[in-house]
Image (cartoon, grey):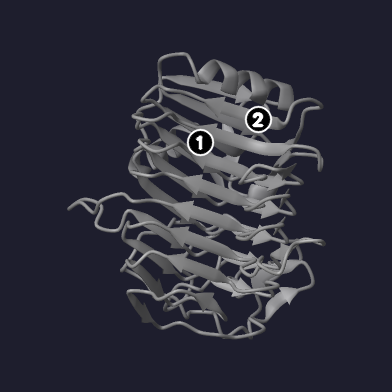
Amino acid sequence: MFRTRMAMLAILVALGGNAVAATFCVNSGAELRSALASAQNNGESDEILVASGIHEVDSGSTAFAYSTSQDFAVSIIGGYNATCTIRTDIASFTILDGEDQRQVLALTGSANSDGYIGVFNVLIRNGYSDQFGAGLEAGGPTGFSGTVNVNNVIFLENISTTAVGGLSISNPAGRISVLGNLFINNGCSWDYCAFDLLSNAPATALHPIPVLFGNNTVVESVCINGAPASCDVSGGRFYGDANAAFFNNVFAFNEDADLRLQGSNVDLDHNNLLTWIGTPASQSGNLAYTDPLFGGPGNYRLSSASPLRNAGVIGAYPFGALDLDGNQRIYGPEVDIGAYENTVAIFGNGFETPF
């Protein structure tokens, strides 16, 4: 699928980001690092368009960092051509790499700020750090009340020597949306190796469910060698008082428990979920297939025989128009569970690409 830059801008506005005032087109790790350094202090909202390719740097404890006290927006969007005029909606085309030496990406606001943070259409891999979120750390400290959106991102083999190898979002008073992502073989030593979400955001008429975690695939999360026995949730966690919904997600082949709920307002709706710790506020339509019948080794698309096809819920929660391959999100009578929609009837070779 191809999108013009103006089409993507319309999507970001719809997601709730501020109007774009500054746009960066980056073609290397050095350019991405420079763009983030400029964006954090330029007094305006920023859109950083990242060209397809592998982006890495050879210094620092974090490859790409943005830390601001401003109430503006920053969005990182991958998949562009070299001139950032055409975008391809395939996350694996744009790779942010920590080279097994550093945290990959950190995007944070300050206490009492309410900026917008968005990451779209990239692959984040090989993070290695003692920070929470060796792949991506986003949000802010107590008092931060912004919005964090992470959509159509692949988190691959990120390792934290403490907690949270893949994605850590701490948004104490703000909203979180994590939609259509793939978490593969992320590791940690303490717990929550794939993801950790924190929010105490109040419900409003416009946003009655401030935390949305939907149509994600979370697989092969591990407590790393030498981790203590207390590392018993290799999947992820939600922590906080916010209303939260986990819907249409695949959890499979994780080493320990898939999910810990440390909040009393969490709905579990139409997930493939084997083991969890904690008590949801409600649960409906959940499945527990040990083997979801993916497309093959290293391929996390659903095969045509998968019981998770057309097994999701439509209408109760928002989700993106496209899946992680850039195909239409709903193909058939219902949405599929997980990050990919099975469209094998019209895309005969759809299961040949890794991830």
Amino acid under label 1?
Thr
Q: Earlier in the sequence, mark 2 or mark 1?
A: 1
Q: Nearer the viewer, residue 332 or 232?
A: 232
Q: In the rendering, at what x and y percent does residue 294 appear?
A: 68, 76
Instruction: Look at 36% across and 25% down and name the residue there.
Output: 71
Residue 161: give x, y in percent of width and height.
Answer: 73, 49
Q: Is residue 21 left or right of residue 336?
A: left
292 left or right of 113 in image: right
Identify which amino acid the numbered label 2 is placed on: Phe
Residue sitting at x 54%, y 43%: 120
Q: Quadrant of residue 192?
A: bottom right
Find the distance from the CA under tag 2 to the CA under tag 1: 25 Å
Asked whether 122 or 168 is in front, the reply is 168
x 71%, y 69%: residue? 229
Q: Position of residue 33 (x, y in %)?
A: 66, 23
Callout 1: helix, strand or loop?
strand
In the rendered view, does 48 fall on the left or right side of 238? Answer: right
Mark 1 surroundings within 10 Å by alpha-carbon count, few (fewer than 14), some (14 through 19), many (20 or more): few
Foreground label between 2 and 1: 2
Q: Is residue 28 visible?
A: no
The C terminus - image quarter: bottom right
Name which residue lies at 44% across and 37% down: 141
Number of residues whose C-alpha sits closer than 10 Å to that of mark 2, classed few (under 14), some (14–19) or many (20 or more): many
- Residue sticking out furthest to the left: 205
Regarding mark 2 in the picture, which secondary structure is present there? strand
Q: Position of residue 110 (x, y in %)?
A: 43, 28
Give the vertical position of 299 relative to 20 (above or below). below
Q: Where 71 sits versus 290, above or below? A: above
Residue 104 vertical placement versus 268 (above, below): above
Q: Which residue is mark 2?
A: 64
Residue 119 seen by the camera: yes
Report the disc number at residue 4.
Answer: 1
